[in-house]
Amino acid sequence: MKNFPRTEKTRVRRLPKRAHYDVETVYSILDAGFICHVGYVVGGQPFVTPTAYWREGDHVYWHGSRASRMPAKAANHNVCLTVTHLDGLVVARSGFHHSINYRSVMIFGKPHQVEDEAHKLRAMENFVERIYPGRWKELRPVTRKELKATTVLYMPIKEASAKVRTGGPIDDEKDYRLPIWVGVIPFQVSNSTPLPDSRLLAGVMTPNHALNFCHLGIRPA
């Protein structure tokens, strides 16, 4: 199993037993999500921007408006990209031991802007197809104006680590005798019935990719 190197930035110091440095765990957490948070510094002021992302091989991609702050300031500068999934609320016998079951990834690196139009268009197609398999061929072609207005960034996944918590509460031994309910309240992402647009043409059927997200590990509500 291939592991990412443990660096001063990626080494998990608090509860290191929850750390994972293997590529399989990091990629699985990335592939289960839609939204990441990108942290960067502009003139000494830190910013964290939420944005949609996707993974292609050993690179992570994200996009933004050409007019926004983040793409212009993040390109070729050090950033920290994070993804977190909430899996459950852990209810303990004391407030101190309440916790959360989660899966998280932290990636450090310098993103680069996609300059080549063919590369950018291919990346945008991969983004759409990752969430909605088969949808790209149904859409009208991207215009040059839209392509120009969109900035796509990509970053190699070389310095990364994951941290995962599972299981129930861990209480002080003396507290196990207390008559208090404890356990885990599970959380999971689910999709509900698609809502058609008010100007949808008559006779247009709901496509399967709007109903079935099992390829992303999402269950119907």
Image (spheres, rainbow, N blue to C red):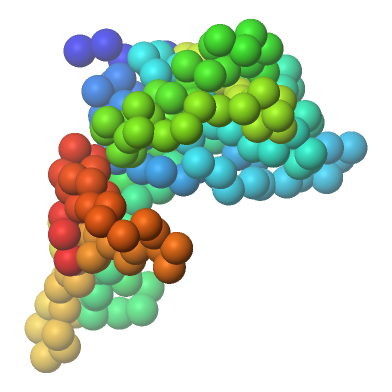
Task: From the viewer's side, name the closer residue of 22 and 156.
Answer: 156
Horizontal side of 187 relative to 10 (left or right) equals left
Residue at 70% x, 29% y is 145
Residue 155 vs residue 104, the one in the foreground: 155
The residue drawn where x is 24% and y is 74% is 91
Residue 27: x %, y % from top left: 31, 27
Quadrant of the image containing the C terminus = bottom left
Q: Is residue 109 above or below residue 195?
A: above
Rendered location of residue 13, percent (x, y) = 45, 38
Residue 102 appears in the picture as rendered: no
Residue at the (39%, 59%) spot, across then down: 200
Q: Is residue 190 left or right of residue 152?
A: left
Question: Quadrant location of the N terminus?
Answer: top left
The location of residue 202, given as percent across then percent down, is: 31, 60
Q: Nearer the viewer, residue 93 or 23?
A: 23
* Residue name at image x 33 percent, y 66 percent: 195
Question: Does the image show residue 214?
Answer: yes
- Give how far across and how far down residue 31 sits, in percent: 31, 33
Q: Identify the image quadrant of residue 169.
A: bottom left
**Position of 44 relative to 108 (above/below):** below
